[in-house]
Image (cartoon, coloured by chain):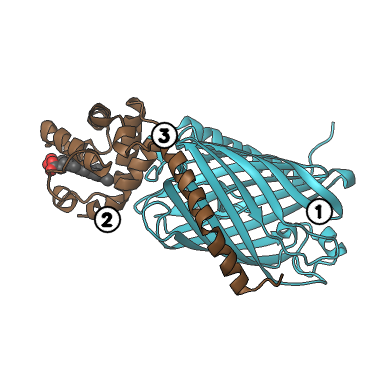
Amino acid sequence: MIINRSNIVAALRRARGLIGLFLGAIFLAACAVHPKPSLYEQLGGREGVALIVDHLIERIGADDKIFHFYAETKISRFREHLQGQLCAVSDGPCHYAGDSMEQVHAGMMIQEADFNHLVELLIGAMEDAGTPVPAQNRLLARLAPMRGQILHR
Amino acid sequence: MRFPTMREGRGIVLRFMFFMLISGATLLNSAAYGASGKILATPGVFQVEGAAGGGLVPWAQLAGYASDEEFALNGFCSRAQVDDYRLDVCGAQANFYDRVEISLARQNFSVAALDAEIEQDIVGFKTRLYGDIIYTSWPQLSLGVQHKKLADPAIAYLLGAEQDSGTDIYLAVSKLHLGAAAGYNFFWNVAARSTDANQLGILGFGGPRDNRTLNIELSSAIFLNPHWALGFEYRQKPDNLVVREDDWRDLFVAWFPNKSVSLTAAWLDLGDVAGQSDQRGWYFSLGGYW
Ligand code: HEM
């Protein structure tokens, strides 16, 4: 048999049904074995997110470096809005009801080091809350793109 | 009783200074005195030629925890022990505002069989041209230079090297992808280096077979958590001399207990080195960050 393009195309066409079946089976098997939980669920749902936010507030309250940013902040409002935002970015059943990131952080002149420090407090808070490392990283991956809206404003 | 020679004396003083620097860094709390504006582990560790990087490959990150408003100073010592040779390196690195890195390193290469030591000094400069390994969607990009001067060129000349000093230029790109590997953070770095150095420069610069070549160097790592990274490196090498020079590889584990210290261990495969084949062994590196 001569191997040329039309032969290969014909072979693929013959195998099309089989390939489709094979991919379908893999897809179904993957879904059956791991009905993939949303990031919100990986974070522990409503209670998990609430726990993370509470531990974060605790850590900010005990911090020398960035507490001064929050000295005048109303904790109940911050807690509610941050919970709503973490829930919304992790595909939970919420809608973020606060102001835009630009508006919230306007006038603060947050620097790179401040931002990274808050990220580390958040990692600590997730550790406190028992959040699994992969869920921690996935949440950070979704928050990281907001940095541009928060720095130097 | 035998008194140390001038050279040995110098080595002892240098080692003592680095020991003091590193134990000092461990004792002082980095939060109180030093730079800490980057996220734990993101500056990487200490490259054998003094740059911030992996063990073998320079990375695009600049040394230490300095952010755009900070200054950082680091010190390290590393040892590579393979079948027939040992390489000891101690060095210091400074980072100015996460824009410029300057490094100094002294290498001591010992050949047990010949009871010989070869010493080399390296001055390094690196500048960040673009980006941030985490936050920009394109990778961080840096340009670096390493100027090397061999103190003991006799063996290098014997093997056909043409110079006792040389300058490497490299471009490095790095990126950390948060949660990208089944939820774990994934890091990669690619460096392209123009060099005429034989075995880092320890066997001199240039030779009968070739002079300057372009070499590709790769690193990759997975973070198990914020403190532990596992990775590998691959460093393409020139082959200028008549004695064969092979590409280098390692598998490493790095531990970052806090922002003051890091400890790296690696398994090395250096291939043929100066006529001895299949040089494999271990690498350990300890560094302090301010
Ligand atoms: C990805 C990173 C960040 C996210 C997602 C984030 C999110 C939020 C949210 C949702 C709120 C509540 C908004 C509202 O009350 O309407 C908030 C408030 C606040 N954030 Fe951030 N933030 C981030 C980084 C930072 C950093 C780095 C700092 C300073 C170091 C900071 C300082 C503050 C302060 C002080 C408030 C309270 C403002 C007030 O008193 O009304 N934030 N942030």
Q: Residue at x 78, y 51 (%)?
A: B271
Q: Which of pointers 3 and 1 indicates the residue nearer the eye?
A: 3
The answer to whether B199 is drawn above or below residue B260 in the figure is below
Q: Residue at x 12, y 31 (%)?
A: A76
Q: Which mark is residue A133?
A: 3
Q: Is residue A79 left or right of residue B287?
A: left
Which residue lies under the disc numbered 2?
Answer: A148
| Tag 3 near tag 2, CB within 8 Å | no
Chain letter of the residue beneath label 3 in the structure image: A
Q: Which of pointers 3 and 2 indicates the residue nearer the eye?
A: 3
Judging depth in this view, the residue of B44 and B109 nearest the camera is: B44
Q: Which chain is cyan?
A: B
Q: Quadrant of the N terminus of chain A?
A: bottom right
| Tag 3 near tag 1, CB within 8 Å | no
Q: Secondary structure at mark 1?
A: strand
Q: Is residue A142 left or right of residue A34?
A: left
Categorize mark 3 by other alpha carbons within 10 Å: few (<14), some (14-19), many (20+): many
Rendered shade, chain A:
brown
Q: Are marks 2 and 1 on the same chain?
A: no
Q: Residue at x 81, y 53 (%)?
A: B272
First in sequence, mark 3 or 2: give its number: 3
Which residue lies under the disc numbered 1?
Answer: B272
From the Cβ of disc 2, is ligand 1 less than 8 Å away?
no
Q: Is residue B163 left or right of residue A25?
A: right
Q: Position of residue B149 (x, y in %)?
A: 69, 61
Q: Position of residue A145 (x, y in %)?
A: 30, 52
Q: Residue at x 22, y 42 (%)?
A: A88
